[in-house]
Image (spheres, helix red, strand yellow):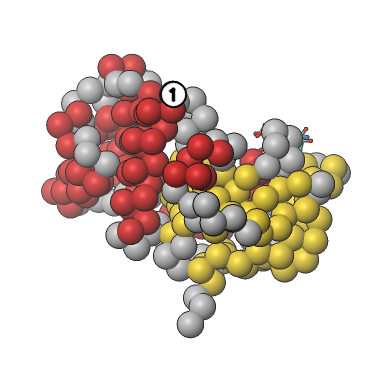
Amino acid sequence: MSNPILQLQNASIYQKDNLVLSNVNVEINKGEFVYLIGKTGTGKSSFMKTLYGDLPLKEGDGSIVEYDLKTLKEKDIPFLRRKLGVVFQDFKLLTDRTINDNLLFVLKATGWKDKDKMNTRIEEVLDKVDMKTKGFKFPHELSGGEQQRIAIARALLNNPELILADEPTGNLDPQTSVEVMEVLQDINKNGNTILMATHDYALLLKYPSKTLKCDNNEVYEVVQKKR
Ligand SMILES: Nc1ncnc2c1ncn2[C@@H]1O[C@H](COP(=O)(O)OP(=O)(O)OP(=O)(O)O)[C@@H](O)[C@H]1O
C-alpha cells in the first residue's frame, strides 16, 4: 500500500513573482530513495526550498510529513523542519565549535534537555555515518567528505521522516561523492526516505533509483533504461 510522505498536486513553484515550475504532480512514499535532476537553473533548489518552507506554495496543493504546505504558517516552519532532515551542498556546519557542539546546538535548539540522552543521541548519529571518533574535532579539521557525513548525522538527530539533500555531493570529488552516497544508501536501507537533488549522473548510473527531472518548467518522472 502506498504511504505518501510527500504529495504535490498541480503545484506551481515560484521565486518571488517568477514561475519556476508549473503543474507539479509528485508523490514520494515512505522508504523511497528519489533523485531530483535537471540542468542548472531548472528549479531543483526552488523545489526543495518549497518543501522545507523557505518558499511559499502559492498555487496547487502540497503536503509533506503531514504538514499542509498551502496553509503553512511562519510559526509552523521550525516544527516542519524537525520532521525533515535537510542537507546542503556547502555543509553549513558552525565553524566556531566542535562537531559534538554542532550537534548539541541542534538538539538544544529543538527542545532536548537531558544531557545524557543528548550525548547518547550524538554518539548514535555519528556512528551511523562512521564518524564516532571525530566528535572532538572542529569542522576545518575534517575533509569535505567528512564534513558532509557530519551534516548527514546532524540531519538524522531528530529521526526525520524525510531527508532532503540538495546537491550533497556538489562540492566533493568523485571518490568522496561515492563514499557520501554509500552513507545515504545505508541510511535509506535502514528505513529513511530520501529526496536528493543532484546533477551527478555518475551517481545515478551507479545507484539507480526513482528519478524526477526538472525541465522546461515541469517536473516529470524519468524511466531509467535497463543497461
Ligand atoms: N532568490 C531568487 N530570486 C529570484 N529568482 C531566483 C532566486 N533563486 C533562483 N532564482 C531563479 O529561479 C530559477 C531556478 O533556480 P534554482 O536555483 O531553483 O535552480 P537549480 O536547478 O537548483 O539550479 P542549480 O543546479 O544551479 O542550483 C532560475 O531561473 C533562477 O535564476
Residue located at (33% from left, 53% from top): 187
> Which corner quadrant of the image does residue 143 belong to?
top left
- Report helix, strand or loop for mark 1: loop
Q: Nearer the viewer, residue 66 or 143?
A: 143
Task: Identify the residue at image location x=27%, y=30%.
Answer: 99
Q: Amino acid at mark 1?
A: Asp
Q: In x, y percent, where is residue 41?
A: 73, 35
Check mark 1 vs ligand 1: CB closer than 8 Å? yes or no. Answer: no
| Residue 35 can be seen, yes or no | yes
Horizontal and vertical percent position of residue 51: 61, 54
Q: Between residue 53 and residue 155, name the one nearer to us.
A: 155
The answer to whether 189 appears left or right of 122 in the picture is: right
User: How many numbered tags mark residues here?
Assistant: 1
Q: Is residue 17 above or below residue 10?
A: above
Q: In the visual, does 71 lie left or right of 204?
A: right
Relative vertical location of residue 143 with respect to residue 227 in this rendering, above or below = above
Q: Which residue is mark 1?
A: 173
Name the residue located 34 percent from the left edge and 43 percent from the top edge.
Answer: 182
The residue depicted at 30 percent of the width and 38 percent of the height is: 103
Query: Seen in the image, is 8 located left or right of residue 119?
Result: right
- Residue 144 position within the rendered picture, expressed as x and y whole percent measured from the top left: 38, 23
Please state the horizontal and vertical placement of residue 206, each as a whole percent of the image. 44, 44
* Residue 109 appears in the picture as rendered: no
User: Left or right: 169 with respect to 126?
Assistant: right
Indicate the quadrant of ligand 1 in the picture.
top right
Kindly give the residue lying farthest to the bottom in the view shown.
1
Q: Residue furthest top?
A: 140
Q: Residues within 10 Å of mark 1 (few under 14, many from 20)?
A: few
